[in-house]
C-alpha cells in the first residue's frame, strides 16, 4: 500500500468476525470488500454491484413472506426503505464499519469513513463477498440479523398496511367482535438470537373456535401480525 493509501484501523477479517459473527476463509476477499476505490485498484466496486443484488433479493423474500397483505407496489416501497443508502449507512455505522474501511488519504482527511454513500457501498460489498464465499443460505442468515433493526422499524406503521388496509390483527379482532366472540390470545413461545437481533415466535389462539396458529418475526409485534394472518387464512378470510 502506497503512502497515499490508508488501511482501515481494524483488519477486515477481524471486523467480519466481530460484527458478522462469521469466520472468513478468504481474508483477502473481505479485505477487497472493505477497500474504497480511492485506496487501490483492487477495490470493492464489483463486489458492491453483486451485493446490491443479493441484498435486494434477501429483503424482497423476507417482505414477501412477512407482509402477506401488501401488493407489489407496497412491497417495493418497503424494500426501498430497508435497502436505501441512508438505511444501509445507519446499519453500517452501528456495525462500526468505518474503522475497518481502507481509503485514500484524501478521503480519510475529509471524513469519508462517515459518508453515507461510502458506508452503504461497503456494506453491500461485504454482502457480495459473503455470498461468494459462503453461499445464499449463510448470507441470508447473517444479513437478516444485520438488518433486523431496519426490518423491525417497518412495524412503526403496523396499524395499517402500506396501502391503508387494516392489518391482520385488527381485521381478526373486528371479525371476532362482529360475531360476539372473545378476542384472540397471543403468547410468545420462543425467542432466538442476540438481544439486538432476536427472532420471535408467537402463538395466536381463539379458544371459542379451537383454532390456533404460529407466527415468526423480528419483533414481537411482527410475529403477532404473522400469527394473526395465519389464522385469517385458516378461517378463509
Image (tube, helix red, strand yellow):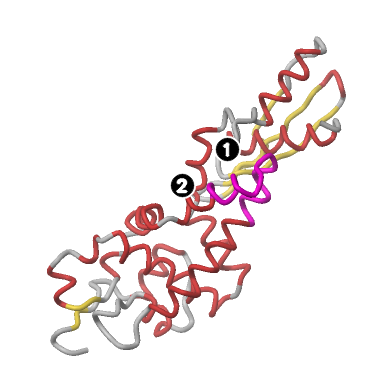
Which residue: 23% across, 78% down?
Answer: 7
Mark 1, Cα crowd under 10 Å, few <14 / some 14-19 / many 20+, is many
Q: Is residue 30 magenta?
A: no
- Please state if 69 lies on the left or on the right of 179 as rendered: left
Which residue position is annotated with label 2?
Answer: 149
Residue 3 horizontal side relative to residue 219, left or right: left
Q: Main secondary structure of the magenta part?
A: helix
Residue at figure coordinates x 87%, y 25% from the top left: 210
User: Can you say whether 236 is above or below 148 in the image?
Assistant: above
What element does badge 1 sit on? loop
Give the answer, above or below, for where 130 lies relative to 183. Answer: below
Q: Residue at x 58, y 34 (%)?
A: 221
Q: Residue 140 appears at what percent x and percent y?
A: 58, 63
Q: Please state the horizontal and vertical placement of residue 191, each as a whole percent of the image.
A: 60, 43
Quarter of the image where one finds residue 214: top right
Q: Which residue is nearer to you in this view: 215 or 174?
A: 174
| Quadrant showing the C terminus | top right
Quadrant of the rendering where the N terminus is positioned: bottom left
Is the Cβ of the residue at disc 2 closer than 8 Å to that at disc 1?
Answer: no
The Cα–Cα distance between marks 2 and 1, rounded to whole angstroms, is: 19 Å
Highlighted range, magenta: 61-78
- Whether residue 68 is in magenta: the answer is yes
Q: Which of the marked residues, 2 or 1, is nearer the chain's N terminus? A: 2
- Residue at position x 78%, y 33% in the image: 231
Residue 222 in picture, x, y percent from top left: 60, 38
**View extreme (front): residue:** 73
Residue 200 position within the rendered picture, expressed as x and y whole percent measured from the top left = 61, 42
Q: Which residue is mark 1?
A: 162
- Residue 173 versus residue 50 in the image, above or below: above
Amino acid at each position: 500500500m502506497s503512502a497515499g493509501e490508508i488501511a482501515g484501523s481494524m483488519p477486515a477479517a477481524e471486523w467480519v468476525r466481530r460484527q458478522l459473527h462469521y469466520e472468513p476463509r478468504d481474508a483477502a476477499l473481505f479485505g477487497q470488500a472493505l477497500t474504497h476505490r480511492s485506496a487501490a485498484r483492487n477495490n470493492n466496486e464489483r463486489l458492491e454491484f453483486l451485493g446490491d443484488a443479493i441484498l435486494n433479493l434477501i429483503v424482497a423474500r423476507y417482505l414477501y413472506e412477512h407482509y402477506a397483505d401488501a401488493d407489489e407496489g407496497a412491497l417495493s416501497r418497503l424494500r426501498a426503505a430497508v435497502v436505501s443508502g441512508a438505511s444501509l449507512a445507519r446499519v453500517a455505522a452501528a456495525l462500526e464499519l468505518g474503522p475497518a474501511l481502507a481509503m485514500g488519504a484524501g478521503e480519510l482527511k475529509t471524513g469519508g469513513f462517515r459518508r453515507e454513500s461510502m458506508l452503504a457501498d461497503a456494506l453491500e460489498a461485504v454482502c457480495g463477498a459473503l455470498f461468494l464465499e459462503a453461499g445464499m443460505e449463510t448470507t441470508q442468515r447473517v444479513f437478516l440479523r444485520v438488518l433486523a433493526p431496519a426490518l423491525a422499524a417497518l412495524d412503526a406503521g403496523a396499524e395499517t398496511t402500506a396501502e391503508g388496509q387494516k392489518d391482520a390483527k385488527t381485521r381478526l379482532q373486528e371479525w371476532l367482535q362482529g360475531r360476539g366472540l372473545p378476542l384472540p390470545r397471543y403468547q410468545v413461545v420462543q425467542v432466538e438470537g442476540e438481544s439486538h437481533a432476536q427472532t420471535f415466535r408467537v402463538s395466536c389462539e381463539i379458544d371459542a373456535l379451537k383454532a390456533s396458529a404460529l407466527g415468526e418475526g423480528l419483533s414481537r409485534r411482527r410475529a403477532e401480525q404473522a400469527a394473526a394472518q395465519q389464522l385469517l387464512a385458516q378461517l378463509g378470510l
